Amino acid sequence: MSKLIVDREFMTAPLTGMQFGAFLSAMDLGTAYRDQILLSDKAIYFNMMGKLPNQKQREDVNEALNFLINEGHVVAIALGHGNYIVDCQRSFHYDLDRLPHGGKMLVYEDIKKIMQSGQSWQGALRYYLMLADHMTKDNRCSYSRQYFANKLKMNEASLTRYNSLLKKLGVIIIVPRMDMPSYYYLKHST
């Protein structure tokens, strides 16, 4: 299983699902053992979805990567035609000591399940990362749907759908409690 250490502050950034997806896919491809790597939009999308992108999907990935580069989330040089030289050491953090707000270890295969789940994957991924950021040391989160709806600027009905999807995918476990918010657990949290 491929594991990623993601900055807690980054997980709550106001990014789109495609921006998060492109970042996490590039992070999975840009291993800790490389200083730099050449990545293409096709490789990043294929790593996300398990299939080659069409032209619109390539444009979405390139738009997301250019935003991440411009905002400083990824240190890279755009070579054109969907190719990027990414500075892995400055873009992706593998050492918790380098993360001022701490980090969360996530299993990339779980993230990939979400991205490959269908049309609502972008909102579900944003919600999953928000849940992961709010996990306590015992891998439990007990914030209400209303709390997350306000944080993500989504309605509670969407979060209910995302909960069902994430449970069905096997990436979270939800334990209902009487007259209290449910407990949420990441299935493969480390």
Image: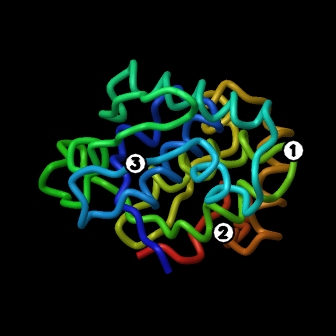
Query: Measured from the top left, where is residue 10 in percent x and y?
Result: 39, 38
> Taking 43 as reference, is 179 left or right?
right
On the image, numbered disc 2 is attached to which residue? 172
Q: Earlier in the sequence, mark 2 or mark 3?
A: 3
Query: Measured from the top left, where is residue 100 in percent x and y?
Result: 17, 42
For this orientation, the residue located farthest to the bottom is 1
> Which amino acid, mark 3?
Leu
Res 33 quadrant in image: bottom left
> Which amino acid, mark 1?
Gln
Mark identifier at residue 22: none
Helix, strand or loop at label 2? It is strand
**Disc 1 or disc 2, which is closer to the eye?**
1
Q: Earlier in the sequence, mark 1 or mark 2?
A: 1
Residue 151 visible = no
Mark identifier at residue 119: 1
Query: Measured from the top left, where is residue 93 in percent x and y?
Result: 26, 52
> Taking 109 as reference, is 71 left or right?
left
Location of the C terminus by quadrant is bottom left
Q: Nearer the viewer, residue 4 or 123?
A: 4
Measured in 3D between alpha carbons, the distance from the residue under mark 1 to the one under mark 2, in whole angstroms, is: 19 Å
Q: Nearer the viewer, residue 67 or 178?
A: 67
Is residue 130 depicted above or below 112 in this figure? above
On the image, numbered disc 3 is attached to which residue? 38
Helix, strand or loop at label 1? It is loop
